[in-house]
Image (cartoon, helix red, strand yellow):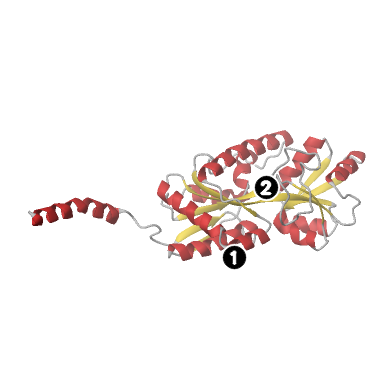
Amino acid sequence: MRFTMIVVAALSALPLVASHAAEPQYPSRPVRLIVPFAPGGPTDTIARVIAAKLTESFGQQVVVDNRAGAGGNIGMGLAAGASPDGHTILLVSSSFVVNPSLYRKIPYDPYKSFALVSNIAASPNVFTAHPSSPVKSIGELINLVKANPGKHNIATPGVGTTPDLSARLIALTAKIDLTAVPYGGAGPAVAAVVGNQVPFGCTAMPPSTPHIQAGRLRALAVTSAKRSDALPNVPTMAEVGFKGQEADTLQGMMVPAGTPKAIVTRLHSEIVKIVKMPDVSKRVVELGFDIIASTPEQFAAQVRTEVEKWGKVIRTAGVQVN
């Protein structure tokens, strides 16, 4: 009798053992982390920090694959068509929510092509002026431009970037003739204002913050909902009387649509764990970002809100890239 009970117990355990044995290990091979921008930018820097920590946790190499071009569309399209098995991850910036309205055609659907993991971190934009300019606030900038319509430019990192759209949004809101001058990236835009080739600028905080702290640029306002820890003395746009100007540069992780939910959950838990590490959080904040680590549901809601918000600005300003 005792022997029979042992045999029955052993047999009943077989399906459970078989079930565990059948579950594929994740990851089972190296993971590709696509960054749709060139090396050296803030998205690439954060991706490399995340990749190093994921490599340690996974026991598999996580390799950053830079696929720049077409405002991020090349890399995002490549990721959208990848196998949904968790071995291809995508890290995007705000072009993900801007491009659906900015381009006539894009190689992904912001709502259907991906399973969202988390908005890891975000950085507000900052309006700046050359130190030789008499302008010391957004109000003074607006008054100057109103008094001299058609004579003032503002440097931005490129057509359709959130800093570019922030500059166009304040021009629309304040009804001023301020001309956005798009450069080929944040670096050239910052250099143009530092060199006083253009008196004003609007960029994401990371490339401008060192110059602000060194006195080479004067910060006028940030586009965050609250003041940034990196520039605590700089007011928000709402504080100076312009609500609804909030904008930031997100750093969002996602995987191709159809990726098993268990993998999405695993990636999210890894991200939450990684950004709590002191060395990671310190590095992210030094870059000028605030740690977000949103849930997949929160990130999905943010994407819907921002696609609609920036689409309205783009249509009103008449901005489009063919």
Horizontal relation, residue 198 to residue 125: left or right? right
The numbered mark, 2 or 1, whose residue comes first in the sequence reads 2
Circle count: 2
Q: Position of residue 194 (x, y in %)?
A: 82, 59
Instruction: Check the image and report above or below for 199 versus 311.
Output: below
Asked whether 19 or 37 is in front, the reply is 19
Quadrant for the C terminus in the image: top right
Q: Position of residue 129 (x, y in %)?
A: 84, 53
Instruction: Check the image and report above or below for 147 versus 200.
Output: above
Residue positioned most to the front = 2
Q: Amino acid at mark 1?
A: Asp
Quadrant of the rendered structure where residue 25 is?
bottom left
Quadrant of the rendered structure where residue 176 is?
top right
Residue at position x 59%, y 55% in the image: 68
Residue at position x 72%, y 33% in the image: 316
> What's the mark number on residue 279?
1
Residue at position x 63%, y 59% in the image: 284
Asked whether 118 or 63 is in front, the reply is 118
Label 2 secondary element:
strand
Q: For label 1, count other residues whose C-alpha is less than 10 Å away and answer few (under 14), some (14-19) or many (20+).
A: few
Q: Amino acid at mark 2?
A: Asp
Quadrant of the rendered structure where residue 212 is?
bottom right
Asked whether 151 or 127 is in front, the reply is 127
Residue 178 in view in this figure = yes
Label 1 secondary element:
helix
Q: Position of residue 70 (x, y in %)?
A: 62, 49
Is the C-beta separation of discs 2 and 1 under 8 Å? no
> Which residue was labeled with disc 2?
248
Alpha carbon distance from label 2 to label 1: 23 Å
